[in-house]
Amino acid sequence: MNEALTPTESSTSPQAAFSVLFLCMGNICRSPTAHGVFRHLVKEAHLDAMVHISSAGTHNYHPGEPPDHRSQQTAAQRGYDLSDLRARQITEADFIEHDLLLAMDWDNLALAEHACPPPMRRKLRRLTEFCRQHDAPVVPDPYYGGTEGFTQVLDLIEDACAGLLDHVRRQLHHTK
């Protein structure tokens, strides 16, 4: 686990009332897609000053790399820009600084739980718990598949992020 944060990887913004981190294995397909989709929804809801969004990987396979070109292309077709995002590995500080850490699948949730300080484990959940239309336990890894896998991932993420936005709104309302 990489413990150091560079200034560009700061996990929370000073004005953010709620902070979400999306988590997958390498932080180049699923978690940056969720990051981009949720960032778009939060901005449309005029909550971007109150909600901080980040993404990370459980593994340090692609540090500093942009999202996979297939993720970027699929997201762009629906109006989401992922081009400014860069892969990084989750840090110990992420468990403390984020209010909610959302894993894409069971394996990454287990890895996060293992690395997470016990008092912070309550913050760990699967993104698909917020799905409203799809009944999927996980967001599958599209990396070794074809274009249809990236489309399926985006479908699940859009659904879950819409439910997540409602959850965050409720959390923000309770903190007022």
Image (cartoon, rainbow, N blue to C red):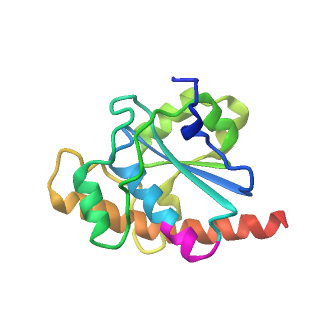
Is 126 displayed left or right of 51 in the figure?
Answer: left
Q: Position of residue 151 (x, y in %)?
A: 25, 65
Q: Nearest the camera: 59 or 52?
A: 52
Asked if residue 41 is positioned above or below residue 22 in the image, the reply reads below
Identify the residue at the far front of this view: 7
Residue 152 x, y percent position in the rendering = 28, 64
Residue 42 on the magenta span: yes
SS majority, magenta: helix
Foreground: 79 or 97? 79
Q: Residue at x 74, y 50 (%)?
A: 14
| Residue 79 in picture, x, y percent from top left | 35, 72
Vertical placement of residue 46 versus 59, above or below: below
Residue 94 in magenta? no
| Residue 138 visible in the current orientation | no
The structure residue drawn at horizontal position 18% and vertical position 44%, both measured from the top left corner, is 144
Task: Give the answer, above or below, for where 158 lies relative to 57.
Answer: below
Q: Which of 107 and 38 is in front in this view?
A: 38
Q: What stretch is highlighted in magenta?
A: 40-46
Q: Where is residue 31 in the image (x, y as percent from the top left)?
A: 42, 50
Residue 157 in view of the camera? yes
Residue appearing at x 69%, y 30% in the figure? 118
Choose top left, top right, bottom left or bottom right for residue 172: bottom right
Could you tell me how many numbered marks the image carries?
0
The residue positioned 33% from the left and 64% from the top of the image is 154
Q: In which quarter of the image is the C terminus?
A: bottom right
Q: In the orientation shown, which residue stands out farthest toward the left? A: 146
In front of the other: 129 or 49: 49
